[in-house]
Image (spheres, rainbow, N blue to C red):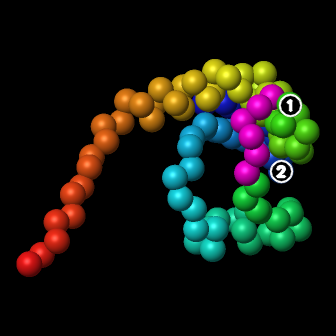
Amino acid sequence: MFLITDSLDGSGGVQHIFAARLERLDIEAGTGTEFDKPERGSHEVVRIPSTAETIRQIKLMPPELAEFAAGNVEALTAVLDAQIASVPVTQTAIRPTE
């Protein structure tokens, strides 16, 4: 987790940022004030390789997050890979009916 504190509209704000692997996404289901304010920009899914070079090439905001992600990409990827490896896999067999 990465924390950023800043001033938002005259008061303090804290952003909690988590690393996660995306399993599925329905962009049309997006809700929240960020989707109601087009003047703040658009929200689109951009898939990029998990490399420091690529992270430095995109405009990841805020800049503190971009620096942290680029400087720690191997550690972040290793933690996510370890979490995936620790999740038990359930197999389901489908048998034909007669």
**Front-lying residue, 32 or 53:** 53
Assess whether residue 48 is covered by the magenta stretch. Answer: yes
Residue found at x 69% / y 40%: 15
Q: Main secondary structure of the magenta part?
A: loop
Binning the other alpha carbons within 10 Å of mark 2 as few (below 14), some (14 to 19) or many (20 upward) gives few
Q: Find residue 21 and report its horizontal and vertical position in percent.
A: 56, 43
Residue found at x 83% / y 43%: 61
**Front-lying residue, 15 or 30:** 30
Disc 1 to disc 2, C-alpha distance: 34 Å
Q: Work out whether residue 5 can be spotted.
A: no
Q: Find residue 87 and report its horizontal and vertical position in percent.
A: 36, 36
Amino acid type, residue under disc 1 in the picture: Glu
Which stretch is magenta?
47-52
Name the disc covering residue 9, or none.
Answer: 2
Which numbered mark, 1 or 2, is in the foreground of this view? 1
- Please say if the residues under marks 1 and 2 sit with CB atoms less than 8 Å apart: no
Residue found at x 60% / y 38%: 18
In the picture, residue 83 is in which quadrant?
Answer: top left
Q: Regarding mark 2 in the picture, which secondary structure is present there?
A: loop
Classify residue 31 as left or right of residue 8: left
Assess whether residue 86 is covered by the magenta stretch. Answer: no
Binning the other alpha carbons within 10 Å of mark 1 as few (below 14), some (14 to 19) or many (20 upward) gives few
Q: Work out whether residue 1 can be spotted.
A: yes
Q: Regarding mark 1 in the picture, which secondary structure is present there?
A: helix
**Front-lying residue, 23 or 40:** 23
Q: Find residue 58 and report its horizontal and vertical position in percent.
A: 88, 43
